[in-house]
Amino acid sequence: VPYKVVGGTRFYERKEIKDALAYLRAVDNPDDTVSLRRIFNVPKRGLGQKAEATLAAHAEQYGISFGQAISDAAGRARPQTPDGQITLAPPVAGLATRTRTQVRRFDDILEGLRTQLREGAGVAELLDSALDTSGYLAELRASDDPQDATRVENLAELHSVASDFQAANPDGTLADFLERVSLVADSDQLLALRAEQASADMRELIEALTGE
């Protein structure tokens, strides 16, 4: 996974790249609360702050993850316990019918992607499916904003990165790819901090030499 700077902003810090990776992280780990809350209403699907807060409260009340709260609201059966018992999900109070329907659609998108993962889909294929089934790519393509056209290009570049990863790592998993991306993003941030510090040091040196 290469280090990239696109248009003056580090590649992995761009919103569309963070959003796309959040979808992949949520697929890989259903209990990744940070990623799930990032994409909960991205693109906009009528799930605002009230719906998010309601699910967060449900999760806290029953000691479960935000991801499990989404499944509860969607009416999805909980996984069997190790001894084969089926636990009925408690109802999520305070969700309007329309909101519950939108949560179910969101849950269906994620479960569909997880099914693809279990069936052996590669990282690039999962990325494409996430961007398509969520409506994320369609929304960008329908926009007249030139910046959204650039975002589409950046997502195409992320697809290329995923394809290159698959080619170089035929047995690499989605988790492997996400770990590699995180390492690159961390080194990206470290390089930026070093560059900022070097720039500050240079300014201090110039000020000392010129007396300004």
Image (cartoon, rainbow, N blue to C red):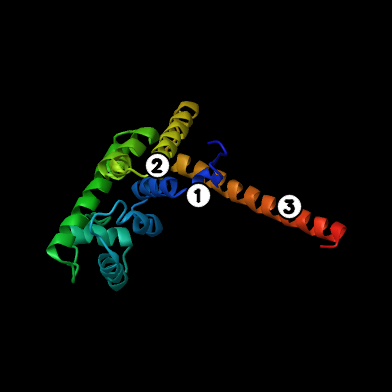
* Quarter residue 98 falls in: bottom left
Looking at the image, residue 172 lies above or below residue 58 = above
Residue depicted at x 69% and y 51%: 194
Looking at the image, residue 114 lies above or below residue 47 = above
Which residue in the protein does label 3 denote? 198
Q: Nearer the viewer, mark 3 or mark 2?
A: 2
Tag 2: amino acid: Pro
Residue 123 locus on image (x, y percent): 39, 36
Q: How many marks?
A: 3
Residue 152 locus on image (x, y percent): 39, 38
Which residue in the protein does label 2 denote? 146
Tag 3: amino acid: Ala
Q: Is residue 77 visible?
A: no
Quadrant of the snapshot with the C terminus: bottom right
Instruction: Give the structural element (helix, strand or loop) at label 3.
Output: helix
* Quarter residue 115 falls in: top left
Which residue in the protein does label 1 denote? 13
- Residue closest to the eye, 141 or 1: 141
Q: Earlier in the sequence, mark 3 or mark 1?
A: 1
Q: Are marks 3 and 1 in contact (CB under 8 Å)?
A: no
- Residue closest to the eye, 173 or 206: 206
Please tell me how crowded label 1 is: few (under 14), some (14-19), or many (20+) other residues with Cα within 10 Å. some
Gap in angstroms between the C-alphas marked 2 and 1: 19 Å
Gap in angstroms between the C-alphas marked 3 and 2: 33 Å
Q: Earlier in the sequence, mark 3 or mark 2?
A: 2
Instruction: Give the structural element (helix, strand or loop) at label 2.
Output: helix
Q: Are marks 2 and 1 in contact (CB under 8 Å)?
A: no
- Residue closest to the eye, 129 or 140: 140
Please tell me how crowded label 3 is: few (under 14), some (14-19), or many (20+) other residues with Cα within 10 Å. few
Q: Earlier in the sequence, mark 2 or mark 1?
A: 1
Residue 52 locus on image (x, y percent): 29, 65
Q: Residue furthest left?
A: 97
